[in-house]
Image (spheres, rainbow, N blue to C red):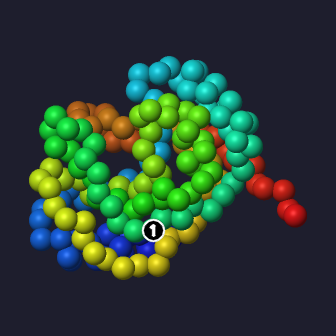
Amino acid sequence: MLETIVAIQDELRRVVDRNLGWVAREKLNVGVFRFGNSRLDEIDRDVRWALSEVKATAFDLVLKGVATVQHRFDDGHRSLYLDGGSCQPLVDLAARLSSGVNRPPHLTLARYRAQMPVPEVKFAPVVFRADRLVLVKSIREGAEAGYHVLNEWVLPQPEAG
């Protein structure tokens, strides 16, 4: 699955005539939730509650289509991403967790500032099994820059039947 996503990213590199900040393959991840400055124990409590509310189990995540969004209006920060917005389990979960600041499920492929049209690249939907949620803190600058795993919640397998 990772190789398929990297191949889509490589195709986009070929068709985009701009210098974008491409996400390194080891940093590709599906993003949904934002918790701001919440404490880890509060986040853990909220996620456990939401998981029980939606009776979450492992699910197939489908990424299809390329889209772009402007994240921060003050500095023009934008992302080019694969869209996972049709993944109902994550949409349901996001509706219960900080719904005002969450984004539809997406996998960011590149970041940039200047506006551009969404590149047209055709590909089959990318499907993979999501069997856990991971809370990651993103630090943008300095010696600690990168993604740091803070917590993980394993999703039970759905009952057969």
Q: Looking at this rendering, what residue extends furthest in the right direction?
A: 161
Q: Residue type at mark 1?
A: Lys
Can see residue 158?
yes
Which of these two is toward me, 98 or 9? 98
Q: Position of residue 62 (x, y in %)?
A: 54, 65
- Which residue bears the numbered disc 1? 64
- Measuring 60% from the left and 54% from the top, which residue is drawn there? 88
- Measuring 78% from the left and 56% from the top, which residue is drawn there? 158
Quick check: 70 left or right of 51? left
Which of these two is toward me, 25 or 119? 119
* Number of numbered discs visible in the structure rendering: 1
Above or below, comparing residue 124 to residue 80 in the picture: below
- Measuring 70% from the left and 46% from the top, which residue is drawn there? 56
Above or below, comparing residue 76 to residue 12 in the picture: above
- Measuring 12% from the left and 62% from the top, which residue is drawn there? 19
Q: Position of residue 110 (x, y in %)?
A: 27, 58
Q: Position of residue 18 (x, y in %)?
A: 12, 65
Label 1: state its secondary structure. loop
